[in-house]
Amino acid sequence: DRLKLNRTAIFIVATTSLVVAYVGESAYGLLEAAYEIGLMGLFVPLAMGLAREPRRESPALATMGFGFVAWITHLVLGWDYFIPPLFTAWQVPASLPVVLVEFVLYLWLDRDRG
């Protein structure tokens, strides 16, 4: 099972990397996308794992999934800002609102059930 999981993860990472490489217009754009996926997908689970003692892994997985979906949506649609059709007056970088939503999502999923 672990070997299949590793092979599947390698395939997903390689496919995603290939898509990002074809979408990028320059080396700077690729570097920007690499830093953005780290911020939008991995920052909240890392910060919360360092700041508090995690009780379950599901909040981390949910926030990573949400961050990846938000990042890939903005990348594919070519949006530089957070949901441009809805927020035309505010030109907020997409990563900031996504990270705030991830913090709330993590705290909501990791709350005590008792």
Image (cartoon, grey):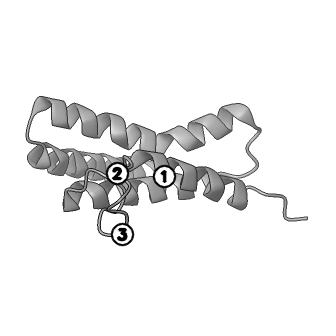
Circle 1 residues within 10 Å: few <14, some 14–19, many ≥20 = some
Residue 83 screen position, x and y as percent: 34, 62
Name the front one of labels 2 and 1. Answer: 2
Residue 76 screen position, x and y as percent: 21, 59
Relative to 89, does residue 9 appear above or below in the rendering?
Answer: above
Q: What amino acid type should be assigned to the residue bearing mark 3?
A: Leu
Residue topped by disc 3: 86
Measure the C-alpha gap from mark 2 to mark 1.
11 Å
Task: Name the residue at 77% across, 39% down.
Answer: 53
The answer to whether marks 3 and 1 mark residues whose Cβ atoms lie closer than 8 Å is no
Q: Quadrant of the C terminus?
A: bottom right
> Closer to the N terminus: mark 3 or mark 1?
3
> Looking at the image, which is closer to me, 81 or 18?
81
Task: Name the residue at 26% across, 50% down.
Answer: 80
Task: Name the residue at 48% across, 41% down.
Answer: 42
Q: Can residue 1 be seen in this view?
A: no
Circle 2 residues within 10 Å: few <14, some 14–19, many ≥20 = few
Q: What amino acid type should be assigned to the residue bearing mark 1?
A: Pro
Task: Name the residue at 29% across, 57% down.
Answer: 74
Residue topped by disc 2: 91
Name the front one of labels 3 and 1. Answer: 3
Measure the C-alpha gap from mark 3 to mark 2.
11 Å
Classify mark 2: helix, strand or loop: loop
Q: Which numbered disc covers residue 97?
A: 1
Q: Specify whether 98 is left or right of 11.
A: right
Q: Can residue 7 be seen in this view?
A: yes
> Closer to the N terminus: mark 2 or mark 1?
2
